[in-house]
Structures are given as structure tokens and as C-alpha cells.
Amino acid sequence: MKRLFAVLCLVTGVAFTGLAQAESQKMIIDTDFSTIGDDGQVLIMAAQLDRQGTLDLLGVTVVTGNNWLRQEVADALKAVERLGIEDKVGVYAGANLPLVHDPRSFENERALFGFGESYKTAFHRPEPADSDVIAPPDGFANKARLQQQDAVDFIVSTVKANPHEVTLLVIGPATNIALAIRKSPEIVPLIKRIVYMAGAVDVKGNTTPAAEMNVWVDPEAARIVMRSAIPQAVIPLDVTNITQLDRATFEKVSKGDGAIAKLFADSWMAESFAKDKNAKASVFDTLALAYAIDESFATRVDDLYMDVDIAFGPGYGRTLGYWQAQPTALLQKMKVIKEFDSKRFFDLYVDLMQRPVPIQFDK
């Protein structure tokens, strides 16, 4: 029935996806979740793609990054409930802290190198107690419950149960993935691929002058993942900086009906566009999802050997791309996306964001 739904959408013009890959692919979304930031937008899009048969969304694993784990889990639980997928897609709590980096070392960075965070992360605020967690705009989840299995064990068991079939969409710090690889290295050849929103190759970072946020929060984890022999594609700031949401596209979503339109209309994006009609908003992680379902969205792809600087200094968390396998044979060649078909992408984006929620699945 899912396949029939997808065909009908395309024939009738309901969907404007034009996706090159018709086969449903199994996916885990590993995220530092926020309600209507780019992570939240990814889940909205992925849920609709699951409904039409493009994706089989197996679960959402959460990691500290944009915010602390407790807050992100509360937001993710409400999101799956809002979307009507709480009975299909479980939420799994992962790492609360990076492997090495932490708020104390961040304070040392600020003291020694004279810069603070440009893009705010969990380190910018105290870790909340349960009583300090802030409800999403439409309240805490009533039905969705956190899964008892933790994120790392869920990743390991799911990959083993579906060898060579699971795509890991990594849109937060890579801590959960690195821990899964360390705990069960036998999963490395069983992972179909990783699509990772991470890094800044030929542009400045957005957290420090050197580093992009997802990598900077946990550089050691990013290095473990990037050095693993897993097929990988990286969506860096190089492409997200030039594929941004404008006011007209934002209003196509925010002026609609339903829960998603209201979240957009009440978001920081609305305030930004109200102040400056020529403003742009980054939608970082959504590009990673689009590429994962259809690689033809990318119009320029460089094959680079990627690494991460983990030396404590001004370059901590910098992503490094080499055309040749130097300076170490440990580096893996991966696809680094540099340019995107912006018009086609935003056609997909608007289409998926405008679809009604909660989603009605076939019984």
C-alpha cells in the first residue's frame, strides 16, 4: 500500500519529490534533536518519506549536542507523537557527554584561545535536572515513551539484524556511533553507509573559526567514525552555507494549516525574516536526508580522504580533507558534497513540510 500511495502522489502531482531512488531504505536517525530546528525538520520529512514508502525509519537515537540529552529526548518524544509515528518509531537515549570534550575543557578553550562559541551548544548552558526540562510549544508527550534499550545497543542490534541494509543518518555529534563501533567493531562491515552532516572543509567553522558544531562537540568521536571502513558521505558547511531557506520558501510552510505550520510561524525563523526580508536560514541536516534518499540532489561531489584534528588548540575539531591518502593510511575516502540542486531540494522540502500530520498509516 505504501508503494501505491507513492505512485498516486507522483501521478496526481501531490508530491514533487522526483526521487531517483524508488526502493525503500532502512534508516536510523542519530540526532541532537530540537523541535523545529533542522533536526526537527529532518524528522518531519523522514516521517512523510516513510509514509510514502521511500524510507523505513527504524528509530531515532538521541545524543547531547544542540542541547543536553534530557531536553532533546523530551522534544523528540513529543515530535514522534505530534507526527503520529510513536507506535512505529522508537526514541532511544544515547550519550549525555562526548568522549573527551566537556564544558570544563570548553572553558579552557575560551581562556587560552580567546574565542567562544559562535553557534551555541549544550556547553553554553547548565545541564538540566528532570524538573528543569522545558516543555515543547504544544506540551510534553502524553503517549510516546522512551525506549528502555539505549541508543548504542539499539544501533548495534539493528545493524546486526539487518546486515548491509541500514543507513545511519548522523545529524549530531558522532558520539553514539563511535561508542557503537567501539563496543561492537563487528558491525563496521555490516553498516550500509553513513551520511553525516559534519565539518567545514574549505570554509570557516560555525562554532569556532576552525570547527563545525557537530564535529566540534565531539572531535574524537568524529575521527573514530571517519576513520572506520564504512562507506560515508559528508554534508559540510561548504554546501549548507549556499543552500539556505529564504523568506518566500519559509512562508509557503508557515502560512499553511496544522501543527507544523504553527511551529514554523512561531519559530526563531519567523522573527529573523520579520526583521530582514532578505534574511536566510540554514537548514543544515535536511540536506543530509535529501542526499541519503537521492544522491542526484548533489551537483558537485569531491572524493576526499577525511580526518579530524583532535589536538587541543585553536584547530580542535577542524575537519581535514585530502585528495590523496596522506598523511596516514588510516584515512578513508568518502564523498564530500560541495554543491546542491537548490531548487529541486526546496521543492521536496516544501512538499514534505506541507503534508498533514498526524500521519495516517495503513493498518
Image (cartoon, grey):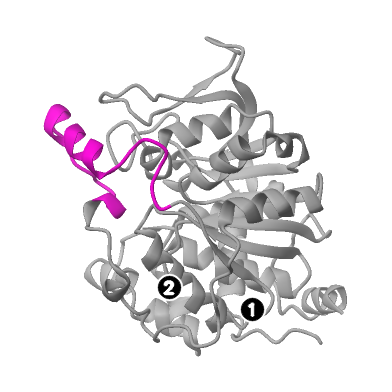
Quadrant where the N terminus lies?
A: bottom right
- Residue 37 lies, in percent from the top left, at 41, 65
Which class describes the residues within 10 Å of circle 2: few (<14), some (14-19), or many (20+)?
A: many
Q: Which residue is mark 1?
A: 85
Q: Which residue is mark 2?
A: 74
Quadrant where the C terminus lies?
A: bottom right
Task: Report if residue 228 is visible in the image.
Answer: yes
Q: Residue at x 63, y 66 (%)?
A: 46
Residue range in magenta is 96-123
Instruction: Let me know if residue 347 is in the magenta part.
Output: no
| Left or right relative to 127: residue 153 | right
| Left or right relative to 112: residue 202 | right
For marks 1 and 2 on the same chain, the one whose residue lies earlier in the sequence: 2
Nearer-the-camera pick, 346 or 53: 53
Nearer-the-camera pick, 136 or 16: 136
- Residue 232 lies, in percent from the top left, at 65, 36
Which class describes the residues within 10 Å of circle 1: few (<14), some (14-19), or many (20+)?
A: many
